[in-house]
Image (cartoon, rainbow, N blue to C red):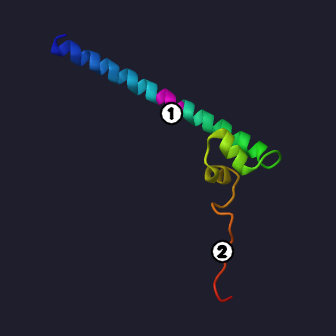
Amino acid sequence: MPAQGRARYELDDLDSAARTLVKVRKDHADVLARLRLLCTALVPAHMSEAEFSRRSGVDRMTVRTWLGKSRSSRTTTTKGK
């Protein structure tokens, strides 16, 4: 293939890959929004944070953030008080 033809093919391939990336990012955002809604509906009433995390593939800290909880379940105390 001549250099110009190859370059045109590569530019078309780049454009196609960029369009695919935009679509995948949108799909990813849509799936995360759906999972967040499911999390807020299911975890308080039907399952634990850990189970939702395991079944959805989302880490537990993300689940806790979606539920408006702190990143740690431990309470901190000050020594000597």
Q: 50 above or below 27? A: below
Front residue of 28/61: it is 61
Element at badge 2? loop
User: Looking at the rendering, in which quadrant would you find the N terminus?
Assistant: top left
- Estimate the x, y position of residue 75 in percent, counting from the top left: 69, 71
- Estimate the x, y position of residue 39 in percent, counting from the top left: 72, 44
Image: magenta residue range: 22-26
Residue contact at pointers 2 and 1, CB within 8 angstroms: no
| Residue corresponding to mark 2 | 76
| Residue corresponding to mark 1 | 25
Q: Residue furthest top?
A: 1
In the picture, the disc for residue 80 is none
The earlier-in-sequence mark between 2 and 1 is: 1
38 on left or right of 16: right
Q: 59 above or below 26? A: below
Front residue of 6/79: it is 79
Q: 79 above or below 36? A: below
Which label sits in the foreground, 2 or 1? Answer: 2
Q: Residues within 10 Å of mark 2 (few under 14, many from 20)?
A: few
Name the kind of residue labelled 2 in the image: Thr
Majority secondary structure of the magenta segment? helix
CA distance for labels 2 and 1: 38 Å
Q: Residues within 10 Å of mark 1 (few under 14, many from 20)?
A: few
User: Looking at the rendering, in which quadrant would you find the C terminus?
Assistant: bottom right
Q: Give the residue at x 73% y 39%.
A: 38
Q: Quadrant of residue 17?
A: top left
